[in-house]
Image (tube, rainbow, N blue to C red):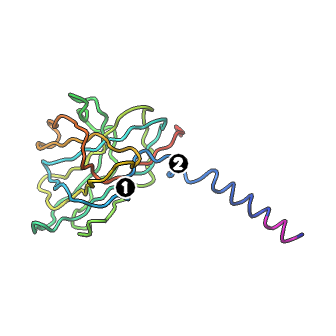
Amino acid sequence: MKARSFLAVLAVVLVSTTAGGDPQERVNLADNLDRLWFGSDRLTDLDWDAQTFNSGECRRLRRVVLNLYQRTRPAVAATGNFWVKLYDSSGPNGSPGPGPVAVLAEPRPIADLPSDTGHQVVLAGLSVPLEPGTRYFVVVGCDSGALGLAWGFTQDSVGALGFPSIFTFSADAGVSWQVPFMNALPQRMKVVGDPDAD
């Protein structure tokens, strides 16, 4: 009888723990990190990349995971800092808007990243307001003079959650953007949202 009661209590505890779940893991909006690395874009103070996700029913951005690492080919000394920002799609032709909606990662040294092409930078503990049903860009760029940052991409996102999605890039530090297009080689990332506004 005691064993049966203990199991019943344990089951209730497990159900209540998993039912509520981690608020940062509530809704995956985009995820192709399980797809094989195929190559990378080199990012600098002028060259920025942007990949979209749709907020769906979410009202908060909780976590972003990006395949960022220090590039070694061609050989270049990693200098300066990189950052990650969130933009809406209010720019020309649906490109990133004139300024960021939020800063997801303050400047971090590129030299602190490993050169492992599978490395993931995890931006957790976020509480960024989202407008439901809206397209946003995760934008990665660098501070002035920075070199050596790579954002990995894949050639296989068929069936990946939230992919294919829109990609664009800037060659002038966000002053202008390439007309956004559905990229067959999307950047590797995961985006997690939360339907709750709090």
User: In the depicted view, which residue is nearer to us: 156 or 30?
Assistant: 156
114 inside magenta stretch: no
Which residue is tagged 1?
A: 65
Task: Pinpoint residue 176: horizontal percent, then vertical percent.
Answer: 14, 35
Task: Pinpoint residue 181: horizontal percent, then vertical percent.
Answer: 22, 37
Which residue is tagged 2?
A: 26
Q: In this view, does 73 lie to the left or right of 58?
A: left
The Cα–Cα distance between marks 2 and 1, rounded to whole angstroms, is 15 Å
- Magenta-highlighted residues: 2-7
Q: Which residue is drawn at 43% across and 32% down?
A: 131
Disc 1 secondary structure class: strand
User: Identity of the amino acid at label 1?
Assistant: Val
User: In the depicted view, which residue is nearer to us: 21 or 182?
Assistant: 182
Task: Pinpoint residue 118: horizontal percent, then vertical percent.
Answer: 30, 65
Q: How crowded is mark 2: few (under 14 residues within 10 Å), some or many (20 or more)?
A: some
User: Identity of the amino acid at label 2?
Assistant: Arg
Q: How crowded is mark 1: few (under 14 residues within 10 Å), some or many (20 or more)?
A: some
3 inside magenta stretch: yes
